[in-house]
């Protein structure tokens, strides 16, 4: 399933947050979005997710308009975390899974798999507020993938995590890709993108300044020029 953005633009009043962005996100690959604060990464994700309309341009999946009623197609890890602190991990996931059409049994079997994988099976009955920030992030990640989406959008997934948690999440992302999920993630840091992505786009003030395959980009520009500076 190939995701394509064609001249996608978003205006907020007089401000243009995303400016004629055209790119293709190939199937079963990891695509990186790099850019400083305010570059337009989250706004682009929200348009792909159908949370806001583009002012101009179109977004298609396999050359068709995305059908957002098929909520199982896309998984989303938002930058601002959205867990319910008083719920247990299990209840949080059952609630979210049911919204996506899953049965309680399906949710629990997937949840067990992911908690084992992150080596925290004991968290199933803990309240979200009892977990560290890194472990809350893992639960947020599980929330994004529990329904086995075809496209996974991760907004700054590694931000604020210690190296062990970053490594575990990276491994999970790579395995999902190997199993056929298309993944798009944003980051401020080139090293995450270099390690994980075949394709990337660097956004600057809403405009794509570099876009293409990582190897070709590195050949054309040299590694030094790919560092993203905050304004
Ligand atoms: P960060 O790394 O800080 O999350 P970003 O690359 O995700 O940044 P966006 O959040 O997409 O950037 O913001 C792009 C620009 O659009 C910013 O100037 C921001 O202030 C503006 N913006 C985003 N959402 C809105 C909104 N709802 N109303 C008005 N302006 C907005």
Image (tube, grey):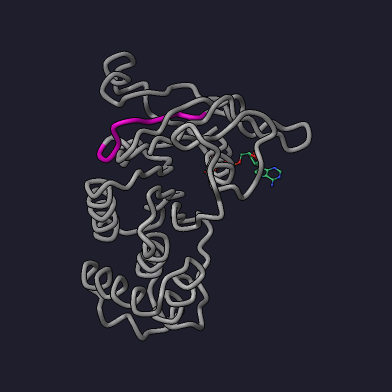
Q: Quadrant of residue 109?
A: bottom left
For residue 192, side relative to residue 206 (left or right)? left
**Span colored in magenta:** 195-203
Look at the image and tell me in which quarter the N terminus lies.
Answer: top left
Residue closest to the eye, 191 or 48? 48
Residue at image point 37% right, 25% down: 226
Residue 218 drawn at (x, y percent): 29, 21
Horizontal side of 69 relative to 144 (left or right) equals right
Which quarter holds ligand 1?
Answer: top right
Residue 90 sits above or below residue 224 on the image: below
Q: Is residue 222 above or below residue 178?
A: above
The residue furthest bottom is 125
Image position, residue 192 (x, y; %): 31, 42
Residue 31 vertical position relative to residue 176 in the rendered view, above or below: above
Image point (55%, 32%), residue name: 231
Q: Does residue 117 belong to the magenta stretch? A: no
Residue 198 at x, y percent in the picture: 28, 32
Of 75 and 164, the residue lying toward us: 75
**Marker count (numbered):** 0
Q: In the visual, does 185 lie left or right of 220?
A: right
User: Is residue 201 part of the magenta span, yes or no?
Assistant: yes
Q: Residue, x 22% and y 46% (percent of image)?
A: 178
| Residue sitting at the far right | 13
The residue shown at (32%, 20%) is: 217
Relative image position of residue 187 (x, y in whole percent): 42, 42
The vertical placement of 128 against 159, above or below, is: below
As rendered, which of 223 and 90 lies closer to the eye? 90
């Amino acid at each position: 399933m190939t995701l394509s953005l064609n001249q996608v633009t978003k205006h907020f009043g007089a401000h243009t947050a995303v400016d004629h962005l055209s790119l293709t996100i190939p199937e079963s690959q990891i695509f990186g979005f790099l850019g400083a604060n305010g570059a337009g990464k989250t706004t682009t994700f929200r348009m792909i997710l159908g949370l806001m309309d583009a002012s101009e341009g179109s977004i298609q999946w396999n050359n068709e308009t995305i059908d957002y009623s098929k909520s199982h197609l896309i998984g989303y890890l938002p930058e601002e975390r959205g867990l319910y602190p008083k719920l247990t991990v299990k209840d949080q996931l059952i609630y979210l899974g049911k919204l996506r059409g899953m049965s309680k049994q399906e949710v629990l079997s997937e949840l067990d798999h992911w908690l084992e994988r992150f080596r925290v099976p004991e968290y199933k009955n803990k309240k979200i507020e009892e977990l560290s920030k890194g472990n809350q992030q893992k639960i947020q990640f599980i929330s994004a993938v529990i329904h086995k989406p075809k496209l996974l959008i991760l907004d700054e997934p590694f931000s604020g995590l210690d190296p062990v948690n970053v490594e575990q999440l990276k491994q999970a992302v790579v395995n999902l890709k190997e199993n056929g999920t298309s993944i798009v993630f944003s980051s401020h840091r080139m090293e995450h993108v270099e390690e994980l992505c075949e394709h990337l786009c660097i956004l600057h003030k809403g405009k794509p300044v570099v876009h293409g395959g990582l190897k070709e980009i590195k050949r054309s520009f040299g590694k030094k020029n790919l560092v993203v500076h905050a304004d």
